[in-house]
Image (cartoon, rainbow, N blue to C red):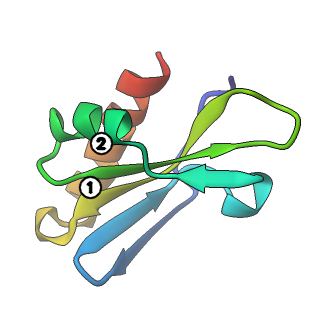
Amino acid sequence: MAKADVQAVETEDEYIHVRFRDPDEFETIRTPDWAANAARDVSEGAEVRTGKREGSDDWEVQSVLIKKNVGEEKAREQAREIVEKIES
């Protein structure tokens, strides 16, 4: 699994979307409960979108959604911490 770097940060509705991988790279994208539980240890209310590539059984973090009230810089830091926690 390749180490992910932040590709984009966008604020929408009540979340800041911190994107690590292009959603078009994946056949399937889900927001699993187990990943959200891990993310909430770092940032309350955070969600994680994971993707599975065609022909692979591995799930990778596509993006992390952080509550908008933390601000973009803090969201970027928290998202990196979440990805590190999940993918290590």
Residue receiving disc 1: 75
Amino acid type, label 2: Ala
Say which label, 2 or 1, has the lower sequence index: 2
Quadrant where the N terminus lies? top right
In this rendering, position of residue 56 left or right of residue 18: right
Which of the 4 quarters of the picture holds residue 13?
A: bottom left
Answer few, some or many: residues within 10 Å of disc 1's Cα (few below 14, many 20 plus, some between 14 and 19): many
Q: Position of residue 56 (x, y in %)?
A: 81, 30
Give the farthest residue toward the top.
88
In this rendering, position of residue 46 left or right of residue 32: left
Residue receiving disc 2: 36
Rendered view: 82 above or below 14: above
Rendered view: 72 above or below 34: below
Separation of residues labelled 2 and 1 (CA atoms):
15 Å
Answer few, some or many: residues within 10 Å of disc 2's Cα (few below 14, many 20 plus, some between 14 and 19): many
| Residue positioned 74% across, 27% down in the render | 57
Q: Position of residue 44 (x, y in %)?
A: 11, 48
Does dot 1 land on a helix, a strand or a loop? Answer: helix
Q: Position of residue 88 (x, y in %)?
A: 46, 15
| Residue positioned 67% across, 60% down in the render | 23
Does dot 2 land on a helix, a strand or a loop? Answer: helix
Rendered view: 40 above or below 26: above
Amino acid type, label 1: Ala
Residue 65 is tagged as: none
Task: Give the label, 2 or 1, closer to the camera.
Answer: 2
Give the farthest residue toward the bottom.
13
In this rendering, position of residue 18 left or right of residue 51: left
| Residue positioned 27% across, 31% down in the render | 38
| Residue positioned 61% across, 28% down in the render | 3
Numbered label tally: 2
Give the farthest residue toward the right.
55
Q: Position of residue 43 (x, y in %)?
A: 16, 45
